[in-house]
Image (tube, helix red, strand yellow):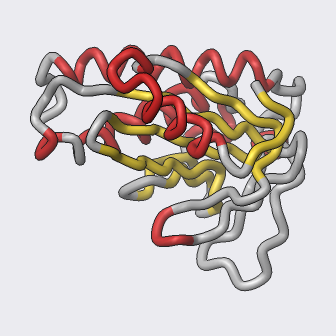
Amino acid sequence: YQPSATSSNDLALAALRQSAGGAEGKCFQVGEQTKGRGRRGKKWVSQSGDGLYLSVILCPKAPRATWSGLSFMASLAVYKALLSFIEDTYISSCGLKWPNDILCDNRKLAGILLEASTKGVIVGCGINLQNAPVLGQADIPPVALDELVTSQSVDPKALACAVIGQINKFYAVWQAGGMQ
């Protein structure tokens, strides 16, 4: 954990460069990202304390041509982790928007960004925990988890552990060839 960084993916990419396959499974969480990013160079607003910004290093043994399947694996893992926190009344309005978004009531709750190098893949996720960012002209307006969980506050550490656990579970299935 670091209170602030350019992005959790930047920390993970640096660790991957340093130790290649030995970095698999390392996780990086930051309190805020000063240069958070999404797909196609889009900015990810990452204010201190408002979100979970987490990256996990994977070093698949499978041929690189199959790595694109990790996008679905990661999105499904984050989605399943979030469902364990969201109150039942909101679950039916939540779903995956291919390839990397988790929406609730057509509002963006989380985004997943995969970045690959020759040594592995970084699975980065940003989840709006509270105070959904004000984005102005957003294609899909944001929503925060605190709007979907009214009976308690969500502990970021518990959510990070749930996300990591689901990534571990679905990654094992993917590596065994089960998500083809």
Residue 83: percent from the left, percent from the top?
58, 30
* Identity of the residue furthest to the bottom in this view: 137
Residue at 31% in and 26% down: 59
Please give left or right for residue 21 compared with residue 38 in the image.
left
Please give left or right for residue 167 compared with residue 155 in the image.
left
Judging depth in this view, the residue of 120 and 171 nearest the camera is 120
The N terminus appears in which quarter of the rendering? top right
The C terminus appears in which quarter of the rendering? top left
Residue at 15% in and 41% down: 64
The image shows residue 21, relative to residue 4, as above or below, that is above
- Count of labels in the image: 0
Please give left or right for residue 88 compared with residue 80 in the image.
right
Residue at 82% in and 37% down: 31
Judging depth in this view, the residue of 174 and 118 nearest the camera is 118
Please give left or right for residue 73 compared with residue 85 in the image.
left
Residue 119: percent from the left, percent from the top?
30, 35
Residue 12, picture quadrant: top right
Judging depth in this view, the residue of 165 and 115 nearest the camera is 115
Residue at 45% in and 28% down: 57
* Identity of the residue furthest to the front in this view: 18
